[in-house]
Image (cartoon, rainbow, N blue to C red):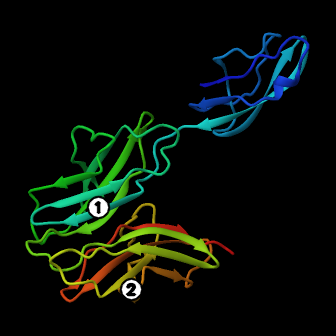
Amino acid sequence: MVTFSAPAPPPNSKTLLKEMATGTFEGTYSVIKVTTDEAGIATGTTFTATKVTGVYQITVSVEGIAAPVIFELTSIDVPNSLNDLEAIPGDGQVTLNWEPPVNTRGRPVIGYIVYQLDAAYNKTRLTPTMLGPDVRTYVIKDLANDKPYMFAVSAVNIVGEGVTTYVLPVTPRTSLPIPEAPTITQVFWRDKELRIFWVGHNSEGKPEITGFKLYRQLYSLQHPLDNPASPWQLIATLPATQDSYFDADVTAGVTYSYYITAINSAGEGYPSNVLFEEAGSK
């Protein structure tokens, strides 16, 4: 259903018929046409639309003369993926931290669902009741040390459950002198390069970060974390002072995934979140 409201034009005046009105879209529709009398468009009038979002024009009749009314329509849908998701290993546990989606598709987030994944990406829900909209962290306990685990989180709004965000395998350990996982903050296309930016996290009681290792693979919708047709490849080993990398060895129209690890004297740390972006043509 689409509902909208617009100012009623006064008698003998057609000017207000071109003012903008607002509305919301739900469902799939096919026809655009509404006819009213000289009282103008009544609040709550419903009609059908041919596209999900954009600017629409309908026809109304004032004093027997047909005239257009233009208004803007906003789509609603399930939320996009989370803005960020990281997994921090501990002794027999993993802590998940996240930020809400940047785009909630027209309706606010009402909660989050946490999943554990097996090797085939089958999801098992870990939160029988949906977590509240203000929750930003979740601890999974009673895990075996030295065994890798995979987790995912999705946001929910009134329309339904949104796009799932995955995190790379993480391994709980009794002693963790290696670095915490860095955070990739953004990946975007500019000047014929995919540009990757990240933040490293030095932790109290652990040796200082001495460098980073950046990995890349071809993105796969079916296997977002482990594409069997394109194994992860180390593309750069970088100094600890570096917080960005411009990848020019890419093909236009191809989407690439990236993650990064930190290095210290104890070894290579845990993988960051995964972000992906398509290489443009200019």
> Residue 188 is drawn in which quadrant?
bottom right
Q: Is residue 91 left or right of residue 121?
A: left
Total numbered circles: 2
Give the residue drawn at x 35%, y 84%: 213
Q: Contact (CB < 8 A) between labels 1 and 2? A: no
Q: Is residue 142 left or right of residue 158?
A: left
Task: Name the foreground residue: 82 vs 117.
Answer: 82
Give the residue drawn at x 54%, y 37%: 76
Task: Name the foreground residue: 12 vs 79.
Answer: 12
Locate the N terminus and report the quarter of the image it occupies: top right
Where residue 48 appears, as percent x and y from the top left, is 67, 26
Give the residue drawn at x 9%, y 75%: 175
Q: What element carries label 1?
A: loop
- Vertical order, 238 against 257 (above or below): below
Question: On the image, numbered disc 2 is attached to which residue?
Answer: 241
Where residue 26 appears, as percent x and y from the top left, is 56, 31
Q: What residue type is labelled 1?
A: Ala
Where residue 146 appears, as percent x and y from the top left, is 12, 72
- Vertical order, 176 against 61 (above or below): below
Where residue 194 appears, as percent x and y from the top left, is 55, 76
Question: On the image, numbered disc 1 is attached to which residue?
Answer: 120
- Vertical order, 126 against 211 (above or below): above
